[in-house]
Amino acid sequence: MDENYEPSEIDVSTDNGGKDKKKKKSWDYEKEIGRLQVELAHLQAWVKKSGARIVIIFEGRDAAGKGGMIKRISERVSPRIFRVVALPAPTDREKSQIYMQRYIAHLPAAGEIVIFDRSWYNRAGVDRVMGFCSEKKAQRFLELAPRFEAAIVESGIVLLKYFLTVSEEEQERRFKRRIDDPVRQWKLSPMDVESYQRWWDYTRAYDAMLRMTDTNHAPWWIVPSDDKKRARINCISHILQSIPYERVKFNAPDLKKRQKRPADFMDDHSIRHVVPDVTP
């Protein structure tokens, strides 16, 4: 990564002087996110120039903040370089394929960063818990996944895996907020309700997944996410620290002069539909 990049330290201390109030040290979340997004833009320029290939996997509990994390990473960069992959349920044709097949099709070419919003690890999580695959297939996946990822890394792809955790209490609070807020209700799926009810089934499945697929060549990085803002700062900082990028000099184009209005140009006065201005 760029040798001039220095992640900011974010601490929270507690004042127990009778009020037990949390006091945050002077840091501005929006300012820090903005600074990290500038670094992501520098990363993007380096990836494009160098032809690097990067895969970032986000897994974790439902309502742990994966969507918000990915949004902060991708909102200020090009979707042609930062590609977000969130696959729907497999079709009948895809169900007949080798399990990894549809994921392999989305791996990056030169100059691309692919962010998986859930990944092949569906097999070790929701598929296993909900019975969408047999226990034998789930176990076989856990045995083969490290070898599959070793092949990815050996091909020259940078592979980063993040698992977002959230407490039972915080997950319940977020689910209730989704129920009460019309603009969040779409986030609450039947699978989310199942994951809420089957917390300990998922706990066992995720523990096995992390234990069996945490390797030297592709380790899991745990992101505590009860505090979403802190999680975003910590995780994006870690991504930037984990990739040996360098800042690429931007060659500013010379805009020169705009062409003059042609002498024979006539304004078009035909009727056009203009969106009404409803602002005060």
Image (cartoon, rainbow, N blue to C red):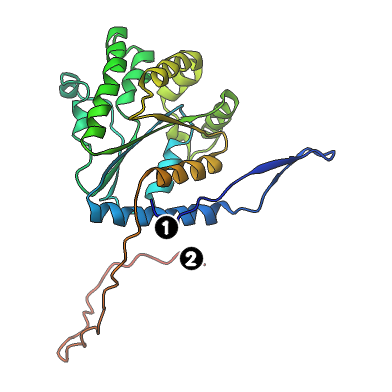
Residue 117 drawn at (x, y percent): 35, 35
- SS class of the residue under badge 1? helix
Report the residue at 16% width, 18% height from top: 96
* Number of residue marks: 2
Which-is-in-front pick, marks 2 and 1? Answer: 1
At label 2, counting other C-alpha atoms closer than 10 Å, the crowd grade (few under 14, some 14-19, many 20 or more) is few
- SS class of the residue under badge 2? loop
Q: Which mark is residue 217?
A: none
Three-letter amino acid code at the position of disc 2:
Thr
Residue 156 drawn at (x, y percent): 23, 39
- Please state if 86 lies on the left or on the right of 172 as rendered: left
Tell me if residue 63 comes above or below residue 146 in the rendering. below
Tell me if residue 138 comes above or below residue 91 in the rendering. above
Question: Looking at the image, which residue sits at the far bottom?
Answer: 263
Three-letter amino acid code at the position of disc 1:
Val
Q: In which quadrant of the rendered view does residue 31 lie?
A: bottom right
Report the residue at 50% width, 42% height from top: 234
What residue sits right under mark 1 in the picture? 38
- Please state if 161 lies on the left or on the right of 204 as rendered: left
What residue sits right under mark 2 in the picture? 279
Q: In which quadrant of the rendered view does residue 118 lie?
A: top left
